[in-house]
Amino acid sequence: MAKKVSCDCGKTFRESTDDGLVAVVQRHARDVHRMELSREQVLAMAEPA
Ligand SMILES: [Zn+2]
């Protein structure tokens, strides 16, 4: 099932797998916000998409 995460900065990420979503959101958080997110944190922010 596809899921999406909406970042506080306005970006939205949508992926068809949990692994893909975790990877892109972790990379965005690290590159743009200098934040390290755990897999659990990313999935807690995810909504069905
Ligand atoms: Zn962001």
Image: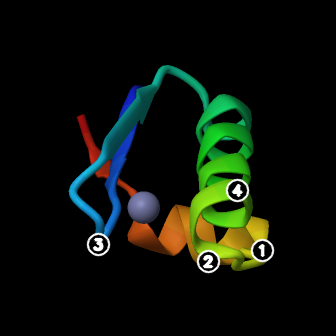
Q: Quadrant of the N terminus?
A: top left
- The mark that comes first in sequence, 4 or 1, is 4
Q: Are marks 4 and 2 in contact (CB under 8 Å)?
A: no
The crowding category of the residue bearing disc 2, from other C-alpha atoms within 10 Å (few below 14, some 14 to 19, many at least 20), is few
In the image, is residue 34 above or below residue 11? below
Mark 4 belongs to which amino acid?
Asp
Q: Secondary structure at mark 1?
A: loop
Report if the beta carbon of the residue with label 3 is closer than 8 angstroms to ligand 1: yes
Q: Nearer the viewer, mark 4 or mark 2?
A: 4
How far across and down, in percent of the image, does residue 35 sit?
A: 70, 79
Q: Marks 3 and 1, Cα distance to the nearest angstrom?
A: 17 Å
How far across and down, in percent of the image, does residue 39 sit?
A: 75, 65
Q: Nearer the viewer, mark 4 or mark 3?
A: 4
Left or right, 25 with respect to 12, comes to right
> As rendered, which of 6 and 49 lies closer to the eye?
6
Residue labelled with disc 1: 38
Residue labelled with disc 3: 8
> As rendered, which of 48 and 14 lies closer to the eye?
14
Q: Marks 2 and 3, Cα distance to the nearest angstrom?
A: 14 Å
Q: Secondary structure at mark 4?
A: helix
Among the 4 quarters of the image, the one containing residue 29:
bottom right
- The mark that comes first in sequence, 4 or 3, is 3
In the image, is residue 39 above or below residue 24? below
